[in-house]
Image: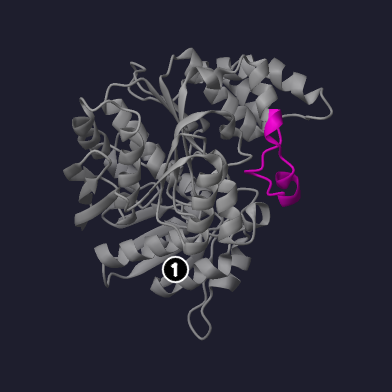
Amino acid sequence: MTYDQAIEYLNGLTNYERRHEPEAMRQVRLDRMQRLCERLGDPQRRVRAILVSGTNAKGSICAMIYEILRAARKRVGLYTSPHLEDVRERIRTSGTGRPEDRISREEFAAAVERLRPAIDACAAEPELGAPTYFEAMTAAAFVHFAQQRVETAVLEVGMGGRLDATNVAEPVVSVIGPIGLDHTDVLGLDAASIAREKAGIMRPSRPVICAPQCPDAAVVLREQAQARGARLIEYGQPISARVFEHDADGLLLAVQGLRGTYESLRVPLLGRHQAENAALAVGAVETLTDRGALRSAVRTGLGRVRWPGRLEVVSRDPLVILDGGHNPPAARALRATIEELWPGRPLHLVIGLSADKPLAAVAEILGPMAATLTCTSSGHPRACPPRELADCFGRPGGRPAAVVDDPLDACTCVRNAAKPGDIMLVAGSLFLAGRVRAGLSVGRRAGSRQRDDRQLEAGACPSSP
């Protein structure tokens, strides 16, 4: 099987990232994923797992844990979703001996080829049905990690926790990031219901590192930890973080962990919320790594963490920022960061959201900070049509939101109209961030900063709805 054939085969599976079908998603059962793994020889049992769930921050926390363990010279794997530009971003391993750590095209094809008979066998069982795209991708990660003899696999939960495909692994430690109202049509209408689903990654006698939560979610997580016999370690008891500096290059902070204080840590990510994420990552690593080189590994690992598409500065002149936050908590963090780091600078917002997201709530947070609004689409099947988005974001009595269907054309128009010192913010969806980032990266791959800055030269002018 070639890489292209592997992609084609996976694209033939049901993909809820592309088709939002709440009723069908609520019917997903964990036993199908368990059966798929059994047919593959249970590769998930050959690595110790760290499961990371939450409504927001889980990707950043995963990336931090991965880099700390890499710096500690551990053989570690990382599985995240969705990807920005290339599906191979989802599966990474340290110590590859290559310039990049993501799975190679040949390794990806080999993993999918190994999967195919097991997937087909599950599909032939009426009570199970064919595994989904996400289940297959998760199984491919397990197969690859086992083949690469990974010691520890850091696994980002796709959605929820209790019935997520990653939950077939047996975590040595679990992490639950901030819980908010997202995917309510699948996970539940309130924070308590969603917290109950997230708590499904807890295990008896195993530690659970938990971010600060709203009161309803906190009560449920404490109850679930007690009922499951898990050891709940909440932020602030004693894990915490303190920010000393926050600028356009990231954070300078101190983390209070389970074993002591880590001073003067540099984290090259934007947003004060990343300090809390760093503390959770450090706490998780402390539960499973010997004391020896941990202090050095924390400093080195956090210092080199990257998480593209999340408050990512892709150009400084002019200032262009990409952010894939798609719910109100993420939008609030984005707004707070921009207002702190670049106060008073005119901001031109290029917005694109999936149709199933809380459009009005995001518009209420991000809309008022924008000098101009341009609504666009990532081209993803779940994307909200730009004209519908413009109706939601348009300001009564003010200048209406512009509409440009193609996101690169939208960025071209905004960038050409911006004045020195202005900000262009591309936000609302990881799918949108990925599309724009891919367009910009053409120039980077050519090795020319000048060409990179000219990627968005031509395009249609925005129109009013």
The span picked out in magenta is: 12-32
Residue found 31% across the figure and 27% down from its top: 289
**Relative to residue 297, is residue 342 depicted above or below?**
below
**Relative to residue 408, is residue 122 depicted above or below?**
above
Which of the pair 247/139 is nearer the observer?
A: 139
Is 412 situated left or right of 405 in this image?
left
Disc 1 element: helix
Residue found 54% across the figure and 48% down from its top: 224
Is 81 situated left or right of 257 in this image?
right
Q: Does the rendering let one see residue 440?
A: no
Residue 97 drawn at (x, y percent):
33, 16
Q: In which quarter of the image is residue 152?
A: top left
Q: Mark 1 points at which residue?
A: 366
The kind of residue on which mark 1 rests is Leu
Residue 174 drawn at (x, y percent):
45, 38
Residue found 53% across the figure and 83% down from its top: 396
Q: Is 393 one of the magenta-colored residues?
A: no
Which of the pair 89/375 is nearer the observer?
A: 89
